[in-house]
Image (spheres, coloured by chain):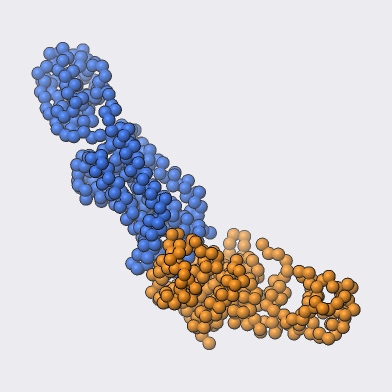
Amino acid sequence: MLKRIYAIFRARNLEFVRDRSSMSWNLVLPVALMFGLSFIFGGEGRTQYTVGVLQSAEELDTEQHPFLETRFIRFVVVNDEAEAVRKIARHQIDLLVQFGTPGRYWINPDSSKGYFVEFALLQSDQPADHGMQKSQITGDAVRYVDWVLPGILGMNMMFSCLFGVGYVVVRYRKNGFLKRLRATPLRPIEFVIAQVASRLMLIMLITSFVYIGTKYFLGTRMDGSYLALFLVALIGAIALLSMGLLVAARVTSEELAGGLLNLVTWPMMLLSGVWFSLEGADTWVRNVANVFPLTHVLESARAIMLDGATLVDVAPALLSLLLMSVVFLGLGAAMFRWRAS
Amino acid sequence: MEIALEARHLVKHYPGVLAVDDVSFQVEAGICFGLLGPNGAGKTTTVEIIEGVTPATSGEVYYFGKPAGNRFREEAGIQFQNTALQDYLTVRESLEMFQSLYNRRADLEHIIRECSLEDLQDRDNRKLSGGQRQRLFLAVALVNKPRLVFLDEPTTGLDPQARRNFWDLVNRIRSDGTTVILTTHYMDEAQILCDEIAIMDFGKIITQGSPAELLRQRYQSVIIEIPLEDVSGDLDSIEHRVLETQGLIEISTDDVNTSLEVLATHVSGLNRMKIRQPNLEDLFLDLTGHSLRA
């Protein structure tokens, strides 16, 4: 069995590596995207200041706290102090304030915007705002490029998994190669394992290469464990590959396969958090997003890279991905067809 | 004699079409068995059911007395009419890949030599000519040292030299005791290669036997061929079977002398006349008709 799997695995690897246009595209696209986005979003593009107000909205009194009417500052009501403090550490909000007696505020001493917002707070002429307790929270900024990196790597994985396996299997079926294999002792499960293993190895190599490249050139952030990140990528890729095999299980036309794969990939690209966060989205949108494997991959990867989450923290997402893999593979194997007609 | 393969009551229904209609036959070990028939007769479907790549609606296939299963897959070599190999692999890599799928293994160097692929073994398999590609497909069918080889219209599209080379190759395979099942619509090919043939039409086997035996049973006569343009009179007075085809008049007769006497009165000259024995093509056309098939 292993000998047969290895034979198909090796042949598929040779085919991929020798198909230079496809190979180059798989490498160049994510790197180009990475540098392009870094160039576009790398600077201080956000001119507005953001202040978190740790208080329920109805209690805010602008008469009493004229600071709240300062122009060019966006005030955001927050309820979770720990989460808000974490955002201060990551420079995602510039200052956190809690009015009261005495009042408190939190600031990141490394944040230039925090410095100016603190100045504005302390200059406000209401005595209630003076004598506030100051807390300093340290932490490096999470640049957009840090936030978007998992999205780009995940998106590249998604396309590579779905099109790289789904499209290839349909092509094999259409040109009769699967029929030829059917006439050998090779079993369907051996073929499927070989395809998944081959693509998985290539995807992990390419993803690692791109990640190392961006880490080296852009100094992207990594607060968690590389092993945990690797496992998230590995299990996520297996789930996406299984999804690709399911889409390709019976399809005999490349045009139809392309349409179906687009039908699956576009919603994932829009709703899984590749380019923007769904934090403020409606509950139903987030529920739909949770059906997609890519959502779990990106949330876990960002939690590890930006928040230092451990494997235990991301275990529920990994379990979801494993469950999806089993379901997709099971359905794909049950529906699999060797022949075009 | 040992029976290598037996098909029992094979039936294949497609929506609105009965492609294979209760087909049964046996193939002795070591022979070349030809399955002939016009386009759409059901021969490729029949063979693909036997090969295990198309499920039958009903019927059974036995390989050396047992239901065809894993042993059959391990010991059979198949050359499909339309197939593809993995892109970007060389000839040698393609052969090595297929060989790795089997426990039985032939000497790869021997196969490469036999199929005249020595100079092509490092070439990308997509860059082969039609004849080279057919030789590679045959080599792929031989990598497991098969006891039974299926060749599905292996010389379609080949030039005359390539066809004859291919026939030599098939004869060499047979000389090792390998059973060959050949589907073809080239009657000369079947006559040269096959020990036994079955002719199919409309999903059924309409006759089966050795080519010589079938011809002997069907014809006790010879065929006189005369160019149509040399015939001046009405040939209705000739009692024997007369057929007009491709600019020729074919007269089937078992009394050549009498026929020639009659013909002498109707034909402007006999210089271009030929007298020949009936062949498989005559038998095939007699049994399946002359009308064009889809």
Q: Position of residue B83 (x, y in %)?
A: 51, 63
Chain the render paints orange = B
Residue situated in front as seen by the camera: A329 or A69? A69
Q: Residue at x 28, y 33 (%)?
A: A42
Q: Residue at x 56, y 70 (%)?
A: B154
**Placement of B126 over or under B188, stated as above or below:** above
Q: Position of residue A286 (x, y in %)?
A: 33, 37
Query: Which quadrant of the view contains residue A118?
Result: top left
Residue situated in front as seen by the camera: B267 or B145? B267
Residue B198 appears in the rendering: no
Q: Colour of chain A?
A: blue
**Placement of B106 over or under A289, stated as above or below:** below
Query: Which quadrant of the view contains residue B130?
Result: bottom right
Q: How many marks?
A: 0
Q: Residue at x 14, y 28 (%)?
A: A109
Q: What quarter of the picture does the C terminus of chain B occupy?
A: bottom right
**Placement of A164 over or under B208, stated as above or below:** above
Residue farthest to the bottom, as pictured: B1
Q: Position of residue B107 (x, y in %)?
A: 41, 77
Residue A62 appears in the rendering: yes
Q: Is residue B201 left or right of residue A243?
A: right
Residue situated in front as seen by the camera: B200 or B117? B117
Q: Is residue B10 left or right of residue B248?
A: left
Q: Position of residue A333 (x, y in %)?
A: 41, 58
Q: Residue at x 11, y 17 (%)?
A: A130
Q: Is residue A65 left or right of residue A187?
A: left
Q: Is residue B174 left or right of residue A198?
A: right
